[in-house]
Image (cartoon, helix red, strand yellow):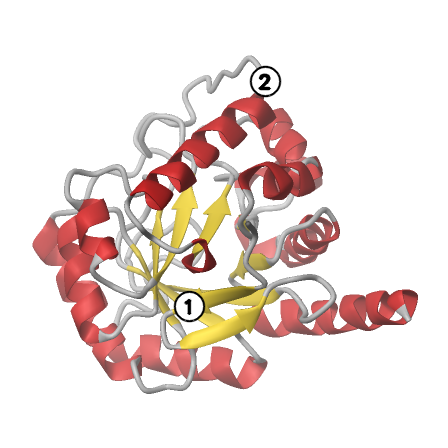
Amino acid sequence: MKSQYFQCGRYRFPISSDEGRPLVMGVLNVTPDSFSDGGQFHALDLALSRAEQMIADGVDIIDIGGESSRPGAPALPLEEELRRVMPVLYALRDCGKPLSVDTYKPQVMREAIAAGADMLNDINGFRAAGALSVVNESDCALCIMHMQNAPSTMQINPAYGDVVAEVSEFLRERVSEMDRNGIDRSRLCVDPGFGFGKSLEHNLALLKNISRLAAEIGVPVLAGLSRKSMIGAITGKPVEQRLAGSIAAALSAITHGARIVRVHDVAETVDALAVWHSVEDIKQR
């Protein structure tokens, strides 16, 4: 049975399209090497200033990431990821917005939960040994993402028979595993993993079929398309010139059924969503 709300740790959001607008998750990469903003917010004071700006711009959830998952990225040692993420999490935990930690390591998950994280965002779909037992002991929201292979190899000739069916099957199995572990579906959302082991054609097929994924899986869909290579492939623009394309992709994802969009450009996306939601609200009256 589908939940009518999304329980994000200490925060609860209406999730049905007739009760609330889609949520904006702002990206806060405290990394030196992320594909789009690596090094910009690596220092604690810069990360906190960026978070304060996102809050002022109307962000709903702040997603803190300490390890780059760009194509070809090497794995980061546990101790370094904790050194990057934990000071930011501790400093922001009373900021008034849900805090998400983007990690696939159960040890980081455990520390983040203890520090007050409201959500865990796992590119590996909580498949690492021990991950489910860690999250089962918490009340964090969980974002389950699909990825073919690993960041170091995922964009080397990704292949599917039917990308929508295969991604849906994977995410349905992971949600079922959460069910078996007693994790309430109100805590769950799924991410098709745009750009994580997908070609442009795969990404477009998934984008067009978000509503199908949401219906088949039974939990909200989060779409992370912001500034990604698919935007560059379509527009021919480098990363720093993909704002318009990213906003168009976010609105397309929402029109096709996404309930959360993960973005770098919070203010511009919030404004675009305000206009989109006003039009949709009038149409439903």
* Left or right of 203 in this view: 80: left
How far apart marks 1 and 2 lie (CA) works out to 32 Å
Residue 19 disc label: none
Label 1: few (<14), some (14–19) or many (≥20) C-alpha neighbours in 10 Å: many
Which x, y percent locates residue 284? 88, 66
Q: Which residue is located at x 30 percent, y 64 percent?
A: 30
Camera-side residue: 232 or 282?
Answer: 282
Residue under the image location 65 percent in, 72 percent down = 270
Residue located at (19% from left, 74% from top): 115
Q: Is 213 drawn above or below residue 53 in the view shown?
A: above
Q: Specify the farthest residue to the top.
A: 161
Q: Residue furthest left?
A: 79
Q: Earlier in the sequence, mark 1 or mark 2?
A: 1
Q: Position of residue 182 (x, y in %)?
A: 31, 50
Task: Say what amino acid the circle numbered 1 marks.
Answer: Cys
Q: Element type at marker 1?
A: strand
Looking at the image, do the residues carrying marks 1 and 2 touch, with CB atoms under 8 Å apart? no
Q: Give residue 168's position: percent from left, percent from top.
A: 53, 31
From the viewer's side, name the closer residue of 194 and 215.
Answer: 215
Q: Quadrant of the C terminus?
A: bottom right
Between residues 137 and 128, which one lies in front from this camera angle? 137
Residue under label 1? 8
Instruction: Using the rendered view, name the quadrant where residue 187 is placed.
Output: bottom left
- Of marks 1 and 2, the one in the foreground: 1
Relative to 47, is 245 on the left or the right?
right
Q: Secondary structure at mark 2?
A: loop
The amino acid sitting under disc 2 is Asp
Q: Which residue is mark 2?
A: 162
| 34 in relation to 10, above or below | above
Q: Foreground residue, 18 or 92? A: 18
Residue 127 position in % (x across, y down): 26, 37
